[in-house]
């Protein structure tokens, strides 16, 4: 139903006080809208004594969303200067003037040309003026007025989100806050109930409720369990007009998720578990897995496993797999089927995060029994000790037993065991072992001073199954016996001055012993019996493992005796007593009055370093042998003679002539002349071969022509012509084969070796014209001709 408004504007004038006009509005129903008139009058607001006409403020009201076909009538402007004769013109300016709002310039009627939307613009401010049409001058001052758009319920409530997501813990109390939804209405909240929104729940009961005025959603059902249902979808409606019939509405969806709390204890799906483990299972290896189920999720489902009791409490351990929440049973100590083959454990599963609010639901733990059966496997022999330490004196005879190792098969079969020494640990084969009883004995003499400890490895293997073997280290310490005599700690070579006095100390001696002494070494020093009475020196034992050499007489003469050799006997006090005789070399030297040596014939004292005489002799011998070898080699090369070219001039057919030079290559044309192989006509015509470029031209010597053979001549001429005229024939060092002898050779053999036996005269003078390379051949055959002539 359309509501009509009527505004009456009253004019107060002619009084000496400020005038104003307040609009009167009245909403009617079922009556046409009355004319709305804005009266223009003069009134000076600044002059309180003189009345003038002026614009009087007012405002128009216009309903939004007009759906009529004609322009919507707004109101009418009127000036008291308007006599109705058309002399005045009304002008409108401001928001939407001329476009949205138009005015009849003659009557002052204002109309709206378009449909207005209050949500886009609720107020329009315009200015009105009346001017004289003829002069164009305003008859009234310009004044403002307002057009307010009245709201209608044309917007439904809109939620701020299309979908809301919320979560609450499961098992929450009734009335627990979930989420608040908010809907807004674009209509005017100050005009009627168009923007008054009321909330209601369309879907989600009886689990949730919503407050109608605030939109707060709360739980409405007690003890909602996530394990039964986790997701809920609630539909909330927002309706304007206070929820009355005819109001517009909008809806939104709220997805509510119940989050988990630890309200479920872990539970084993079975009370007893059975596992099998071979007795050879390595330590920390898994035996089996067990799992307690927990309906909760995330940290509320975390479980910790423990072994609370059982005969395998110290033999096995259990850990938790954080990914699968399984309990992994592992071996803590070595298993032995022969000792115990069955273990019974009690395993407990406990939640690590317990919520005190739900302790009333019961203890958050569970237990189960685990039975582990140990299986027998074929085990290698086991030694009685993890390692053996033995001691043996270094002077024991070979093949002496120094100790025994023991190993046996731990299996019930008790298979026999054989022993051996790992030769990688005893490369010198100092020790051996009896394969039957494990006794270790020496196979070579021992020397503590060479090696104190021997570390060997003994292998014990089953005879029936040698692959089943084990090893044990054996540490053998060689004990010391007094088998080494003491000796000087260094080589002693000293000197005595010629002017020395009697009882003068010239050298202090000390000794060492390779043997060990538990109470410390005690050495005694004395002169050898052969030198005790006749020596020029005396020896004094200091009883602290040192001794001093003293002069026995006053003066010494180096020209008489330049060197003294003093034998000293050193003995120890161990059992058996060991002694040795060491020699001290004493040089007689010239000294000054302070005892400082000036000269001494003992060159070793002055020049202790250098090559010995034997070394120098050896070096000289090597140099002499090297020189003799070089001389012999050179002499043999000089005696080598050159063999003659021809040994016998009588029989040259059986000899090979060596010229010892090489041809000049394809450009050397002086070394030979193949003209004799050509036919006589080619020689007469002096035709040159095109594949030979001689350095000098010469005429070959004419030889006696052999008896003509037409068949061979025609064949050779044909082949020569073909090769001379063929542009593709290879040049120079190529071989053209004329493998054709004809029916019979008139010239018989062409060999030069048989030419000596022929009766025909041979002229070899042309060989002299072939150059120096054929000089030897020309001399040889030329001399033969001269012999024949003679």
Image: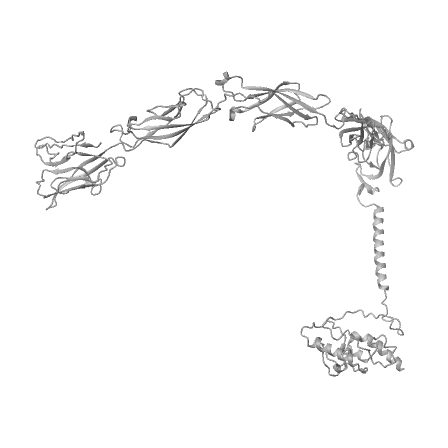
- The answer to whether residue 248 is left or right of residue 508 is left
Residue lying farthest top?
A: 360
Q: Residue 138: percent from the left, percent from the top? A: 12, 42
Report whether residue 641 is seen.
yes
> Can residue 553 be spotted in the picture?
no
Q: Is residue 656 left or right of residue 86?
A: right
Which is nearer the eye, 609 or 646?
646
Q: Is residue 192 above or below residue 675?
A: above
Query: In which image quadrant can residue 97 be found?
Result: top left
Residue 687 vertical placement versus 548 (above, below): below
Residue 424 vertical placement versus 612 (above, below): above
Residue 440 lies in quadrant:
top right
Q: How is the image coloured?
A: one colour
Does 698 sit left or right of 27 as displayed?
right
Q: Looking at the figure, which quarter contains the C terminus?
A: bottom right
Q: Position of residue 248 (x, y in %)?
A: 30, 30
Which quarter of the rendered picture does the N terminus lie within? top left
Q: 21 or 298: nearer the eye?
A: 298
Where does the image place residue 409, in percent across and percent down from the top left? 77, 26
How many discs appear?
Answer: 0
Identify the residue at horizontal 70%, vertical 22% (top origin). 341
- Quadrant assignment, res 374: top right
């Amino acid at each position: 139903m359309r509501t009509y408004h009527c505004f009456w504007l009253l004019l107060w004038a002619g009084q000496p006080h400020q005038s104003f006009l307040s609009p009167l509005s009245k909403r009617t129903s079922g009556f046409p809208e009355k004319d709305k008139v804005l009266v223009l009058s003069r009134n000076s607001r600044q002059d309180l004594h003189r009345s003038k006409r002026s614009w009087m403020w007012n405002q128009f009201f216009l309903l939004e969303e007009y759906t009529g076909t004609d322009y919507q009538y707004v109101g009418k402007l009127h000036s008291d200067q308007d006599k109705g004769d058309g002399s005045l013109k009304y002008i409108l300016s401001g928001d939407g003037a001329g476009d949205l709002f138009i005015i009849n310039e003659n009557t002052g009627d204002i109309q709206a040309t378009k449909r207005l939307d209050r949500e886009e613009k609720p107020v329009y401010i315009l200015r009105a003026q009346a001017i004289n049409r003829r002069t164009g001058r305003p008859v009234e001052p310009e004044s403002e007025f307002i057009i307010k758009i009245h709201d209608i319920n044309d917007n439904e409530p809109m939620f701020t989100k299309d979908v809301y997501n919320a979560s609450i813990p499961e098992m929450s109390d009734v009335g627990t806050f979930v989420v608040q939804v908010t809907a807004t209405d674009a209509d005017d909240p100050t005009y009627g109930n168009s923007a008054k929104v009321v909330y209601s729940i369309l879907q989600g009961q009886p689990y949730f409720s919503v407050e109608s005025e605030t939109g707060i959603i709360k739980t409405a059902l007690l003890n909602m369990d996530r394990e039964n249902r986790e997701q809920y979808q609630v539909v909330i409606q927002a309706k304007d007009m206070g929820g009355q019939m005819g109001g517009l509405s909008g809806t939104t969806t709220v997805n509510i998720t119940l989050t988990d709390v630890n309200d479920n204890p872990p539970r084993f799906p079975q009370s007893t578990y059975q596992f099998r483990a071979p007795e050879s299972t390595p330590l920390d290896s898994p035996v089996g897995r067990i799992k307690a189920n927990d309906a909760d999720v995330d940290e509320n489902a975390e479980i910790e496993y423990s072994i609370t009791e059982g005969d395998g409490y110290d033999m096995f351990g259990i850990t938790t797999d954080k990914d699968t929440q399984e309990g992994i049973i592992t071996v803590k100590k070595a298993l032995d089927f022969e000792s115990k083959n069955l273990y019974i454990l009690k395993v407990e599963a406990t939640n690590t995060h317990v919520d005190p609010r739900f302790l009333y639901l019961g203890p958050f733990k569970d237990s189960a029994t685990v039975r582990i059966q140990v299986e027998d496997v074929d085990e290698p022999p086991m030694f009685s000790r993890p390692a053996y330490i033995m001691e043996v004196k270094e002077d024991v005879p070979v093949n002496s037993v120094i100790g025994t190792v023991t190993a046996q098969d731990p299996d019930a079969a008790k298979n026999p065991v054989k022993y051996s020494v790992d030769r990688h640990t005893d490369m010198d084969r100092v020790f051996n072992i009896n394969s039957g009883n494990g006794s270790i004995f020496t196979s070579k003499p021992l020397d503590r001073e060479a090696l104190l400890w021997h570390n060997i490895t003994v292998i014990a293997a089953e005879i029936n199954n040698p692959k089943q073997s084990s090893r044990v280290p054996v540490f053998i310490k060689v004990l010391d016996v007094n088998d080494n005599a003491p000796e000087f700690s260094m080589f002693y070579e000293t000197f005595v001055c010629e002017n020395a006095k009697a009882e003068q100390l010239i050298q202090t001696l000390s000794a060492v012993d390779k043997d060990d002494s538990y109470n410390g070494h005690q050495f005694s020093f004395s002169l050898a019996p052969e030198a005790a009475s006749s020596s020029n020196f005396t020896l004094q034992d200091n009883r602290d493992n040192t001794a001093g050499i003293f002069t026995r007489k006053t003066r010494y003469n180096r020209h008489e005796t330049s060197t003294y050799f003093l034998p000293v006997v050193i003995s120890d006090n161990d059992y058996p007593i060991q002694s040795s005789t060491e020699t001290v070399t004493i040089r007689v030297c010239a000294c000054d009055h302070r005892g400082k040596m000036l000269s001494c014939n003992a060159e070793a004292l002055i020049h202790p370093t250098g090559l010995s005489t034997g070394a120098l002799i050896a070096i000289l011998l090597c140099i002499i042998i090297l020189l003799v070898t070089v001389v012999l080699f050179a002499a043999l090369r000089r005696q080598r003679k050159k063999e003659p070219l021809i040994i016998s001039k009588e029989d040259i057919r059986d000899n090979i002539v060596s010229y010892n030079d090489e041809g000049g290559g394809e450009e050397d044309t002086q070394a030979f002349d193949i003209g004799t192989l050509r036919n006589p006509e080619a020689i007469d015509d002096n035709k040159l071969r095109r594949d030979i470029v001689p350095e000098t031209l010469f005429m070959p010597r004419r030889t006696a022509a052999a008896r003509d053979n037409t068949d061979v001549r025609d064949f050779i001429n044909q082949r020569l012509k073909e090769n001379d005229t063929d542009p593709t024939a290879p040049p120079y060092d190529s071989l053209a084969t004329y493998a054709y002898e004809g029916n019979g050779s008139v010239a018989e053999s062409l060999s030069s070796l048989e030419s000596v036996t022929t009766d025909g005269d041979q002229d070899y003078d042309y060989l002299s014209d072939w150059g120096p390379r054929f000089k030897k051949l020309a001399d040889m055959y030329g001399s033969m001709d001269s012999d024949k002539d003679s």
